[in-house]
Image: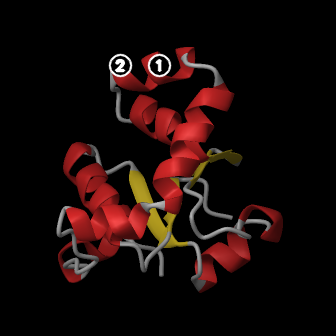
Amino acid sequence: MISAKSIVFFDGECPLCSFWVRFLIHMDREKELRFASLSGKFAKENVPAVHRRDLDTLIFLDNGKIFKKSEAIAFILIKLRRKSGRVLLWVPGVLRDSLYDMVARSRFFISKAFMMSSDFNYEKNRERFLD
């Protein structure tokens, strides 16, 4: 398992998820984060199957610890030194994950409504992607 960098696992087919990845790449000036699709070979080799069941679940692997859903978002933001990550953790997990699940279930509708695309120039950031 790779431990040198923190890894964000996401649904590679989801335009909203691709938008989130582009946002994180932009925010990650120190290039601490790496990215991999939940359905890819790297995820199958490095994330236990129990955590990969739902493609609508964002997973953050940081120093061997796995965070999912809203907790993953909070710890990614903390990793990027954003105060909003700590603020997000003040909200009870049940409420955070309920909102996360609502957005996850509607992610393709949201993507269409805001004309988001899953097209992404992976070659420009190839070193950041693990599969």
Q: Amino acid at mark 1?
A: Arg
Residue 65 vs 96, above or below: the answer is below
Crowdedness of circle 2 by 10 Å Cα count: few (<14), some, many (20+)?
A: few
Q: Quadrant of the N terminus?
A: bottom right
Which residue is at a point 58% across and 49% down the rendered structure image? 101
Q: Amino acid at mark 2?
A: Lys
**Foreground residue among 26 and 73:** 73
Residue 34 is left or right of residue 63, and the answer is left
Q: Secondary structure at mark 2?
A: helix
Circles 2, 1 touching at the beta carbon (< 8 Å): yes
Which residue is at a point 63% across and 73% down the rendered structure image? 43
Q: Is residue 8 visible?
A: no
Which residue is at a point 61% across and 85% down the rendered structure image? 41
Give me the disc on residue 83: 2
Residue 104: x %, y % from top left? 51, 57
Residue 39 is left or right of residue 31, and the answer is right
Give the residue number, with chain letter if any, for mark 1: 86
Give me the disc on residue 68: none
Q: Is residue 101 visible?
A: yes
CA distance for labels 2 and 1: 6 Å
Residue 21: x %, y % from top left? 33, 60
Residue 29 vs 86, above or below: the answer is below
State the scheme by which the image is colored.
Answer: secondary structure
Residue 24: x %, y % from top left? 30, 50
Residue 12 vs 16, above or below: the answer is below
Which residue is at a point 64% across and 48% down the rendered structure image? 68
Q: Secondary structure at mark 1?
A: helix
Residue 80: x %, y % from top left? 35, 35
